[in-house]
Structure formats: structure tokens, C-alpha cells
Image (cartoon, rainbow, N blue to C red):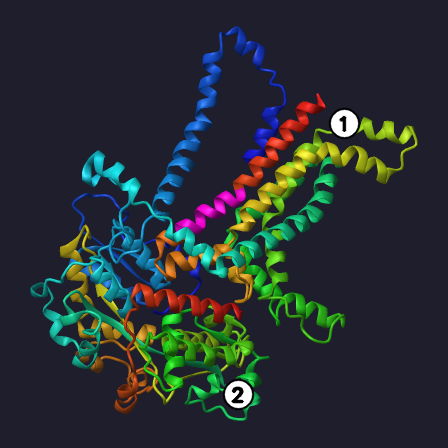
């Protein structure tokens, strides 16, 4: 669900690691994951330990991944779609069931997360969690302080209240161009079920969004990382990890830009990126070895420490940096977790209504 | 750039007598068949596939649409399929004003951009064609040079130039031409700038190739006979460069109508263009049938007027003779 970096990376940046392709007997695994989503030393270590070469390729949107998978013959062995996309892809017959006997490390997984991912993948038969996070509010601390007189954001009100957002209009507001992430938040704000697809409810969400539409500069799913980091905008509705990335880039740039992230108290969406094996994967055994390796506590902890996302591996938490584990915006506390909601995939009919509504909102007409 | 080649091919070929002596209809036909094969494999067959998908319905499957007119039930099944053909997706396109708006906006944006590109490109091409022959190859090289950098990176660079704290605003502010940063990024202006910049070479090259072939003694003759320079330009230079103007305009207009990247990066969210609509239907909605229908209509929208135009041209030429 995180759309990282420039979307040009989606047009296939092949990172062939180690030995150039050659010997037919070489064991290979083709991995297709989100951009900026792994510590590359993890891949190097995997190859050292198993002798399996990793062809690591990246994408930056679920839509791109899904289109490749639905067209068939993608050639990938391990892919990492988000929960609601995974659910539909399972229905379409894209994936094969995991052979759990080849995944002994599955005992390390965190039941709190597995219970929730089972909503998308009943019994977790097709997938295991890689990382998870929230959809919340990223903001430029100083600019928000200047405009609103406070730098404490803890509610959707700052965004859905037209009076408050109007004050932020001039310094810039970006929103994810993703109806499945924003419409549920609007539903939640107006006190409805975030999973509702009834046209009446959707109309209410539309109304709430249309009220603040004049103050939104742009709907885009990845530009806000740079825009936040450069101080070009003051508020963005986006994915947790993307905002943390903006925060880190801003710190590196040392231009005095300070970025905050908030999980609104009314509740926010929790999403899961799941590792799965396509039905037509050419290297099934290697794919299982790769997934099993990624479930080793110290390995996945290393990735979490690098990409700043929480993972669904309970045993890994002793290896995760204390600063990350104690950061409530990454690993929210129990009370917040209770308020996080998941979003189910839309059926084709609801999808059409939602997309049409979304086009109206985005184009403002 | 194939249009340049076509324009050149229209000129009488000097190789012809030789080939005729060689005995050849056969050779000629062989040469002609290559572009036809090319069109067959890379245009007609893909088009038929897209058209076929546009007649199907979405499904949660791989690929995500119901099969239409396939041979899984044998040949009779294939022909039986014709009876069940339905054009629901095309009906859907007419029922929702969104698509009509998107087509119209795209055509208007493309048309304005084409005119702007022509206005910017013509003086450049004219200057190049009148430059000393020794430096022309260098000038030509300079026009092509931007192609050596990725198109995406060049469009991205415009974000850095046009944004509120960008280079352009900083320059204008420091020169005290403006006191408030101009809002250009995420507006239609930014789209026009992006399209004119990106497609300029496609306009300049055909213009240059037709202007370069022009015989400038015609202008001298006009001058000698007392024609002022402006009138000479409109009466002689411009009509003679018309094939270049047409080729250049088509090369800019056609891709600009379906442009996706420039409006996505430089335009605001309010820009409704058909390329973006198509992307949404295909990726966000997984509605391959409807997006195929959008693509088919887009193609008809572009090719039909161009074919009519070419016919009219051909007729005008025949009458001219």
C-alpha cells in the first residue's frame, strides 16, 4: 500500500544481485516487492546462506502489481500485495497455497496481526505478513503551528473540518489518490461504517470530502513524500512509512523541515503487505525458502529497522530498535490498535460507484 | 517521425528507372509488403485483441474479463458467439458524461498545445533552415539532444522549475518582477508548458525538412517584383512548408491527446484527460473491457478525422493538377 519514491521505478528497475545470469543449474528466486522496502544486506545474506540468487524487482502501486498478476505469466516467485488486493487476487486464482511444512519459522508470527490478515486470506493459507502500517496524517510541524496555532494533531478534524483546512490551503495539502484509503476515512469521520458500500453512505462521504475539496492542492499517491520532505506542503493524508521516509529525508537535508505523523484518535485504517507465491511461479521451492528466511526474527527486524515499518513477527520484536518499537506511530499502543479498522475489497458494482464518486471528488466537478 | 519518411517518399524516386529495368513489380511489391506486415502485426492484430476485450465483461479471474469469441467450443462455438455479442461497454460510455468530458478536454488541450508548439517551433525550424550549411548538422543535433535524457526525468525537472519555491519563481522574485510566487505547477498552464517542451522536436524536425528543401530564389524573385517580406512569407514560404506543418501538427496532436505522464506530473487533480481516465479504468478499476472500449473510441476519434483530411488533401491535389 505504500507507494514509494518516483513511480518511474515501477517501470522495472532490475537489481540483479551478485553473479550475472548464466548457469542453468543456478538456483534463482524472482522477488517483486515495493520500492525502498528492504534492507539490501538482507538479500545478500540470503544468497550467502542458501546459494539462491535473488532477482529483486520493485513496484510502487498495488494496481501495477495486480495488472501484471492478472495478465498471468509474470515470472515472479514472491510478490507482496496489500491485504484487500490480495483477497481479490486469491479469488481470481492468482496464488497457490503455501506449503506450511516448508515454513517452520511461521511459529514466529504475531497472532494479533495474523488474526486480522485472516480477514483477507482466511486461515492465512496463501500469505504471510511482511509489514503493516496505518493511513494517517503527515504534517510539517512548523507550518501547521504557524497556520493553526498548534502543532498537536490527533484528530481527523484538522482535515475534514473546512475551517481548519482552509487555513492550511496556502501552504499546501496533498491527499492519496486512492478511494479505498480515503473514502473509508471519510465514512469513519461522519460516524459511519468505514466498510459501507451503500450509495447513501458513499454520498455522505462524498459530501464530507467535497466540503474540503477546495483546500486540497493535489491527489497523488507518491509525490507527497518529496513534497513533505522539501517543505513544499504542510499536510498530507498518506501511508505511515511514506511519511517517516519524508521525515528522514527532511532530517538528512538539514533545511529545518520537521515532519510529524499522527494516527487520528477516531480510528485509522490498518493495512498489511503480504508475501505470497503466484500460482504460475517458476521457482516454488526457492520462493518458500525465501519467505521462510524473511520470517527469521533477526532478519525481519533488520528490515523493520531500515524501512521504519512494523512487521507481523512477534519474535522479531526483541531485535527491533527500541526507538522504533516504542514509537506509537509505528507500533501503536493497545488502545489505538483497538480503533484501527481494516477495509474489505469492493465488489465490482460497488467499485464502479466508488470510482465514479472518486473522480467527481478529485476533479472537483 | 515516419511522416517525414512518407513525405519524402512522395517525391519522385530517382531509383525507379533502375528498378524498372530490373523487372520490377516484384521488387516493388516486396518493398511495399514490409510496412503492411508491420501494420498487421503491430497495429491491426493488437487492435483486434483490444476490440475483442471491449466486448467482454469484467470478472474476478485471470485475465479479469469473460472470454468472448474464442475457440474453446470449437469453430461452431466461435460463430455462435457472434449472436451473444453485446456492446454494453460502449453504451456505458455514452451514459456517463465523464467520458465525453474527458475526450473533449483532451482534444482541446492537445489542440491548444499543438498551436503553441507550432508558434514556438516554426521560427526555430526557419532559423535552422536559413543557417549556414556548415552549422546545420550541429543545430539539428541540438534539437535531438534532449532525447538522450529520459523523458520522465525531463518532465520531473519542470516540477523543480515551476513549483512555488522553484527556480522560475525565485528568479522572478529576485528580479522584483513579481512579489508573490506564481502558481503554475498543477495548473493547465503547466501542462501546456510540459507538452510544448516535450514535443517541440517532433514539430521542428518535419518543419525543418520541408523548409530546408525550399528554393529561396523564389523569395528573391518576390522581392525583385516588389513583394514585402511579410507577404512573401505568407504567399510563398508558408504554403511551401505546409506538408511540414501538417506532419508536425499530427506528430504533436496525436500523442498529446492520449498523454498521461505530463498531466499526471504537472497538472492538477482537476485535469480530466482521457489518458488518465483510461489508466483509472484499467488499473484502479480493473475494468479491462471498459478501458478497451475507451481506447477503441479514442483511436476512432483520432484516425477518422485524419483519414478524411488526407482524402480531402489527395482530392485537392488531383484537382490542382
Magenta segment includes B321: no
The structure residue drawn at horizontal position 41% and vertical position 80%, both measured from the top left corner, is: A186
Instruction: Judge from the rendering whether residue A38 lies leftward or rightward of residue A357; answer left or right.
Output: left
Q: Which residues are magenta?
A: B292-302
Q: Secondary structure at mark 1?
A: loop
Front position in the image: B126 or B108: B108
Up/down of A269 relative to A46, above or below:
below
Q: Chain of mark 2?
A: A
Helix, strand or loop: magenta stretch: helix
Residue B134 shows in this picture: no
| Location of mark 2 (residue) | A164
Label annotation for residue B37:
none
Q: Going by the image, does A174 lie left or right of B126? A: left
Would residue B296 be counted in the magenta stretch?
Answer: yes
* Residue under the image location 72 percent in, 72 percent down: B174
* Residue that label 1 marks: B215
Badge 1: residue crowd in 10 Å (few <14, some 14–19, many ≥20): few
Front residue of B83 and B17: B83
Amino acid at each position: 500500500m505504500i507507494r514509494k519514491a518516483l513511480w518511474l521505478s515501477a517501470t522495472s528497475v532490475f537489481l540483479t544481485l551478485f553473479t550475472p545470469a548464466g548457469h542453468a543449474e543456478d538456483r534463482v528466486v524472482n522477488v517483486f516487492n515495493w520500492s525502498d522496502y528492504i534492507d539490501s544486506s538482507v538479500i545478500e545474506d540470503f544468497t550467502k546462506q542458501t546459494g539462491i540468487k535473488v532477482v529483486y524487482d520493485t513496484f510502487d502501486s498495488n494496481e501495477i502489481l495486480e495488472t501484471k498478476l492478472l495478465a498471468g505469466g509474470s515470472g515472479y516467485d514472491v510478490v507482496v500485495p496489500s491485504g484487500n488486493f490480495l483477497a481479490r487476487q486469491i479469488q481470481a486464482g492468482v496464488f497457490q497455497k503455501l506449503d506450511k511444512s516448508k515454513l517452520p519459522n511461521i511459529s514466529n508470527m504475531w497472532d494479533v496481526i495474523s488474526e486480522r490478515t485472516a480477514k483477507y486470506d482466511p486461515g492465512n493459507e496463501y500469505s504471510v505478513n511482511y509489514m503493516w502500517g496505518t493511513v494517517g496524517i503527515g504534517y510539517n510541524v512548523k507550518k501547521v503551528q504557524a497556520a493553526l496555532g498548534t502543532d498537536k494533531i490527533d484528530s481527523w478534524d484538522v482535515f475534514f473540518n473546512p475551517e481548519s483546512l482552509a487555513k492550511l490551503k496556502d501552504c499546501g495539502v496533498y491527499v492519496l489518490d486512492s478511494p479505498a484509503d480515503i473514502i473509508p476515512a471519510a465514512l469513519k469521520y461522519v460516524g459511519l461504517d468505514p466498510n459501507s458500500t451503500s450509495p447513501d453512505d458513499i454520498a455522505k462521504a462524498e459530501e464530507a470530502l467535497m466540503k474540503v475539496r477546495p483546500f486540497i492542492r493535489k491527489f497523488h499517491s507518491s509525490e507527497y513524500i518529496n513534497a513533505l520532505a522539501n517543505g513544499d506542503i504542510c499536510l498530507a493524508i498518506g501511508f505511515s512509512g511514506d511519511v517517516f521516509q519524508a521525515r528522514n529525508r527532511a532530517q538528512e537535508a538539514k533545511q529545518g523541515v520537521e515532519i510529524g505523523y499522527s494516527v487520528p484518535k477516531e480510528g485509522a485504517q490498518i493495512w498489511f503487505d503480504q508475501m505470497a507465491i503466484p500460482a504460475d511461479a517458476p521457482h516454488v521451492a526457492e520462493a518458500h525458502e525465501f519467505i521462510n528466511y524473511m520470517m527469521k526474527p533477526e532478519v525481519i527486524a533488520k528490515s523493520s529497522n531500515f524501512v521504519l515499518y512494523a512487521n507481523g513477527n512477534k519474535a522479531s520484536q526483541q531485535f527491533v530498535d527500541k526507538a522504533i518499537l516504542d514509537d506509537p506511530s509505528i507500533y501503536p499502543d493497545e488502545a489505538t490498535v483497538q480503533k484501527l479498522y481494516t477495509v474489505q475489497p469492493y465488489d465490482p458494482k460497488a467499485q464502479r460507484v466508488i470510482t465514479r464518486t472518486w473522480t467527481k471528488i478529485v476533479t472537483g466537478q | 517521425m515516419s511522416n517525414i519518411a512518407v513525405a519524402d517518399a512522395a517525391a519522385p524516386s530517382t531509383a525507379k528507372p533502375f528498378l524498372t529495368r530490373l523487372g520490377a513489380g516484384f521488387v516493388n511489391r516486396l518493398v511495399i509488403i514490409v510496412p503492411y506486415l508491420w501494420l498487421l502485426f503491430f497495429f491491426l492484430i493488437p487492435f483486434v485483441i483490444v476490440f475483442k476485450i471491449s466486448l467482454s465483461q469484467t470478472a474476478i479471474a485471470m485475465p479479469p474479463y469473460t472470454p468472448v469469441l474464442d475457440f474453446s467450443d470449437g469453430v461452431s462455438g466461435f460463430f455462435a458467439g457472434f449472436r451473444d455479442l453485446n456492446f454494453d461497454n460502449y453504451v456505458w460510455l455514452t451514459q456517463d458524461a465523464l467520458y465525453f468530458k474527458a475526450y473533449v478536454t483532451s482534444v482541446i488541450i492537445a489542440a491548444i498545445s499543438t498551436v503553441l508548439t507550432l508558434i514556438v517551433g516554426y521560427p526555430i525550424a526557419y532559423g535552422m533552415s536559413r543557417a549556414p550549411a556548415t552549422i546545420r548538422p550541429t543545430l539539428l543535433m541540438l534539437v535531438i539532444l534532449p532525447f538522450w535524457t529520459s523523458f520522465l526525468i525531463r518532465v520531473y525537472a519542470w516540477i523543480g522549475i515551476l513549483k512555488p519555491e522553484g527556480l522560475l519563481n525565485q528568479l522572478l522574485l529576485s528580479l522584483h518582477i513579481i512579489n508573490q510566487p506564481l502558481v503554475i505547477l498543477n495548473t493547465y498552464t503547466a501542462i501546456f508548458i510540459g507538452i510544448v517542451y516535450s514535443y517541440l522536436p517532433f514539430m521542428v524536425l518535419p518543419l525543418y525538412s520541408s523548409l530546408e528543401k525550399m528554393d529561396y530564389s523564389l523569395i528573391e524573385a518576390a522581392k525583385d517584383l516588389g513583394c514585402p517580406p511579410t507577404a512573401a512569407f505568407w504567399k510563398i514560404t508558408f504554403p511551401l512548408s505546409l506538408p511540414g506543418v501538417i506532419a508536425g501538427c499530427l506528430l504533436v496532436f496525436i500523442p498529446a491527446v492520449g498523454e498521461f505522464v505530463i498531466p499526471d506530473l504537472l497538472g492538477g487533480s482537476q485535469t480530466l484527460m482521457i489518458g488518465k481516465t483510461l489508466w483509472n479504468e484499467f488499473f484502479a478499476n480493473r475494468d479491462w473491457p471498459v478501458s478497451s472500449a475507451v481506447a477503441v473510441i479514442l483511436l476512432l476519434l483520432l484516425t477518422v478525422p485524419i483519414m478524411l483530411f488526407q482524402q480531402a488533401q489527395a482530392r485537392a491535389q488531383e484537382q490542382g493538377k
